[in-house]
Image (cartoon, rainbow, N blue to C red):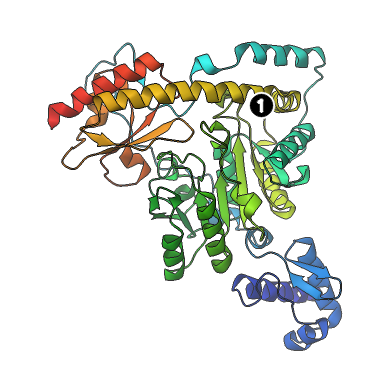
Amino acid sequence: MSTNLAKYEKVMNYIKKAISSGEWPIGSKIPSQRKLAELLSVNRSTIVTALEELKIEGLIEGVMGKGTMVVNNTWTLLAASPPSWDESAPFSAPKPLPAPVLETDGVKAPEHFIELSKGELAQDIFPTDNMQQVMMRLAQSLEPFGYEEPKGYLPLRKAISDYMRKQGTDITPASILIVSGAIQGLQLISAGLLHKGSTVFLEKPSYLYSLHTFQSAGMNLSGLPMDEEGLRADALLKKAMAGPASVLYTIPCFHNPTGILMSEARRKELLDVCAEKRLPVIEDDIYRELWIDSPPPPTLQSLDVNGHVLYIGSFSKTLTPGLRIGWIAGSEQVIERLAEIKKQTDYGSSSLSQLVAAEWISSGLYEQHLSFVRKELKKRRTAALHALDEHMSDLAEWDIPAGGFLIWLRMKEGIQLKDIYSKAYRAGLSLNVGSIYTGESVQAIRLSYGYASIEEFEQGIRKLRQIILEDN
C-alpha cells in the first residue's frame, strides 16, 4: 500500500513540476495515460489515481473531446503543495514598527492630538443609529453562539457573494473565507500558501512595508515603481524576468499610502504579465467602495481568466474597524486550504460580528451607508485640498485622490523633513512619515483627511507648515 502511495505521489509531483515550470501551461493538453505510464515506468492505475487527485486539487480537468487539460497553475498549485508550519513560521514575532518619540525623551504628551495619521473614518461618520437598529433586531432572535463552520457564517458568505456579483465578480459562497480583517487574510496566505524565501512584488511605497507580515514569515519584499495609473507593468515584467518570482501584492483602488487609482488598462497589462510569468496575485481591495467621483474599474479578479487572483475585502475602512470582518475570495481549493489554516489558529471569526455584517449587507443598509460616506469624503476632500493649496503649495506637491481618504504629500526639492515625527508630536500633531511605507528615507508624508474634522485638518496643516519652515 505504501509503495503504491509513493508511486502516485511521484506522478503528481512530476505533473505539478511540469505545470509550475511552464512546461505545461494553462490550456495545454497533458500526455495520455499510456504515455505517462511509459514515461514514469508505472502502471496505468497509478496514473489514473494521480490524475484523479490532481483533478480534486483543481489543477487539471477532463474536457469532452479534448482530453485532460491544465486549468490552473498558481494559487491552486501552491495550495496543493503548501509549506510546512516549521518552514514558514508564519506567526513569529514581527519586526517592530517605527516607534514615535513619545515620552522617552522626557517630553510630556500633549492633551489633544490632531489626527492626520489614522487610516479610518471619523467617529461622526459611524452609523450609530443604524447599528443600534441592527443590533436590536439581532437581539430579538438571538440564539446561543457556537463555532461557525471553518469558512465562516454561510448567510454572510452568501451576502458577500451576491454583493461581489453586483461588482462583476462571479464568486460562490464556497469560494469565500471570512477572516478577522484583511491583516489576518494576509497572515493566512503567508502561512498556508507561500514558502520561506519567496519574493513578494509590490508597489513602492506600500502598506506592507509598515506591516511586516510577509517578512515575519521569512519572505522578501521587492518594491516596484508607480505612475499616475498605478503599478508599472513594464517594471513588473523586468523584475519577474530577473529572478525567481513568488507573488504580486497590490492595492489597485485608492492605494495606501499614495491614493492612486489603478486604471483599467493598467490592470489588464498587469494581468497579462502575471499570466505570462505564472505570477499569482493578492488583490487588496479594502478601499474600493470609498470612491468619490465615480466607481472604480473592475476588480483584477473579475478581469482574470486564469485563476491567478486572490481577492481581499473588508468592512474596516467602510463601516468600522472594530467589527473585525473581512474576506478572501478565490478558487474553492485554495479557500479550503486557507480555511483549514484558520481553523487551526482561531476556530473562526466572531459569530456576533458575522451576524452583524450579514444583516448590514442583506438589509441594504450597507449600500445606503456607503452613499453617505462618499458624500462626507467629498466634503472632507474639498476642504483638505483647499487647506493644502493655502498652506503647502510652495513646500510640497500632491495628487487629487479620486477616492479613499489618503493624500501622499511629496516635499519639493530642497525641503527636508528631519525629525518631523517627533516635532509634530510635540506640537500635538499625529502624522505618518513616508519612510514607514518605503523601508528607506523619503521626503514624504501620508495624510489622512478621513478622521480629523475639517477644522482640525486645516489647523493641522497650518501647524505642519510651521514645523517644516523651522528647519528649512
From what the image shows, is residue 303 above or below residue 49? above
Determine which quarter of the picture holds residue 5. bottom right
> 145 left or right of 368?
right
Q: Is residue 344 visible?
A: yes
Q: Is 177 left or right of 404, judged from the image as shown?
A: right
In the rendered image, the quadrant that contains the C terminus is top left
At label 1, which amino acid type do we have? Glu
Residue at 19%, 43% in the rendered image = 413
The x, y position of residue 25, in whole percent, is 65, 72
Quadrant containing the N terminus in the rendered view? bottom right
Judge left or right: residue 72 versus residue 98.
Answer: right
One can see residue 104 in this view: no
Q: Nearer the viewer, residue 386 or 112?
A: 386
The residue tagged 1 is 367
| Residue at left offset 24%, top offset 20% | 463
Expressed as whole percent of the image width and height from the top left, the position of residue 273 reads 53, 64
What residue sits 73% from the left and 87% below the top? 39
In front: 418, or 372?
A: 372
Q: Could you say which quadrant of the image residue 141 lies in?
A: top right
**Residue drawn at (58%, 64%) of the image:** 275
How packed mark 1 is, by other alpha carbons closer than 10 Å (few <14, some 14-19, many 20 or more), is some
In the rendered image, residue 235, in percent from the top left (x then y), is placed at 41, 61
Q: Is residue 268 above or below residue 432?
A: below
